[in-house]
Image (cartoon, rainbow, N blue to C red):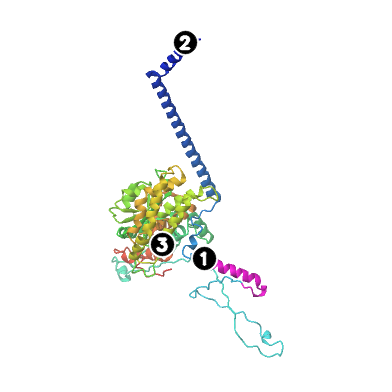
Amino acid sequence: MSFCAAHFDKMRSMQIASITSPNNVNKLKELLTQKDDLIKQKNAEIETLKLRYQSILEQFRLAQHQQFGKSSEISADQLALFNEAEQIQDDISTAEQAATIDAAPASVITRNRPKRQPLPKDLPREIIIHDISDADKLCSCCGGDLHKMGEEKSEQLEFIPAQIKVIEHIRPQYSCRQCEQTGVQTQIKIAPVPASPIPKSFATPSLLSQIICSKYQYSLPLYRQENFFQQIGIDLSRQTMADWMLKCAALFMPLYERLHAILLQQPVIHADETPLTVIHEDKTNCYMWLYCCGRDAPPDDIKNKPPNIVLYDYHNSRAAACAKHFLPDFEGYLQVDGYVGYEQTSAILVGCWAHARRKFIEAQKTQVKGKTGKANWAINHIQKLYRLELEIKNKTADEKYCARQQHARPLLDEFKIWLDKSAQHHPPQTAIGKAIHYGLNQWPKLIRYIENGNLSIDNNRAERAVKPFVIGRKNWLFSNTKNGAQASAILYSICETAKANGLIPFDYLNYLLEELAKKPTDLDYLLPWNVALTRT
């Protein structure tokens, strides 16, 4: 037994020595290290798969919402931002009124019926009197004559289709009969040819204005206008109208350049861009760029307000050189979205809170239905900034600056702290992570609007200005050539600038075509804020 025990102890000692030898210890450490690395690698793969799954799930929810959900970005309480107390009181009053109505008899319940607005008094009127017969003007009781005690009036609006007429220009020719009899060569005298926007054509300023407005204001393609003219017996092909549009754009080009020069003198410019399909163009992706200044709605006092200009610029790319070419040496404020192409300009870039909010709205749509998350907090916080902007909407620039410094700056500081903390927990691959990192990347531009009272909180001014082009593109789908796209840019610019200054585009275009046909050297009297035309 002692021998066996000794042998066992000897074998055990040899095993322990072999295991604890330096080579085996290093191998064990190496194996443990490899195992830890493998675990880390597997954990990283698991996290990557989780993020990928989360991203696919968010994309599915967003696509589902885009297909079946509401497209509006208005928050649920956006319409009641400034009347919380009034809203509560209205709810109480409504409840009390409902209880009163339930208790009241049906005979005393009245409903507020909508009232139709009266038709304008300056419209031509045709008065038709519907009177009863003389026999009915006798009293059915005593047979006495009835007297007129009053009358009832009602209005109807009659539509008279557009009328066309032919203007025939006759220029008598005069010569000397005496010189003709003596054989002396006489000079024939005739009145000069009247100025015309397009010489040697039957297009009048009013006809051209109608075609331009139909396409560039009301988005009616030329082939539909061709059908309209055919119905009234006029053979006017779309090819002819397209050629007229090119010539009108060339006629408007000096005025477009003058508006461009004035635009570059403004302290604040809004910009945006939208894709455009051009058939005969080398590049597939073409873009219509939009630059504007001023206000969305025309001011009451046009003469004493800054210019309101909307200009389109066509390019066959979205390269930064396009914006740099249109804004040479412009060093004022340029309010845009997050597109990096504008960073190569010399302008001071201002961000757009509408785009930042849109990212969180997309993240909100990817959340589980019925649950709230970080996206909801961000949207509600951004809404506080918009609440302030609505309160100071009609204030002066200095008053806006003071209000933003006092009220908006603390909100922005709070939002920045929240972004920094949230970025540590949400990677950029997720929807909420994309929104958070977009806000952080754009932060210096997003807070710049509080530096100047003339700046806006977002770039909606440009987005609304480019919308008429986007709506028109849905109807006519594409431009055929580069020249056609450039002509569209000029004609859209004239129409939208007229609307921005409260002018009726048809009247302004008609006036421009009449005056530009005379080839004036000074164009300032043709600027929309200088013309004496009826304003809406």
In the rendered image, residue 89 lying in the magenta stretch gets the answer yes
Residue type highlighted by circle 3: Leu
Q: Residue furthest top?
A: 3
Residue type highlighted by circle 2: His
Disc marking residue 388: 3
Pick whichever of labels 1 and 3 is earlier in the sequence: 1
Residue type highlighted by circle 1: Gln
Which label sits in the foreground, 3 or 2?
Answer: 2
Disc marking residue 405: none
Percent position (x, y) of residue 120? Answer: 50, 73
At x 53% / y 72%, what residue is drawn? 117
Residue 227 versus residue 33 in the image, above or below: below
Q: Give whichever of 133, 330 is nearer the camera.
A: 330
In the rendered picture of this protein, how many numbered marks are placed on residues?
3
Q: Give whichever of 307, 145 is nearer the camera.
A: 307
Percent position (x, y) of residue 444? Answer: 34, 51
Residue 407 versus residue 108 in the image, above or below: above
**In whole angstroms, how far apart are the C-alphas of marks 3 and 2?**
91 Å
Q: Determine whether label 1 and label 3 are within 8 Å by CB.
A: no
**In whole angstroms, how far apart are the C-alphas of marks 2 and 1?**
95 Å
Residue for badge 2: 7
* Residues rendered magenta in the picture: 88-110
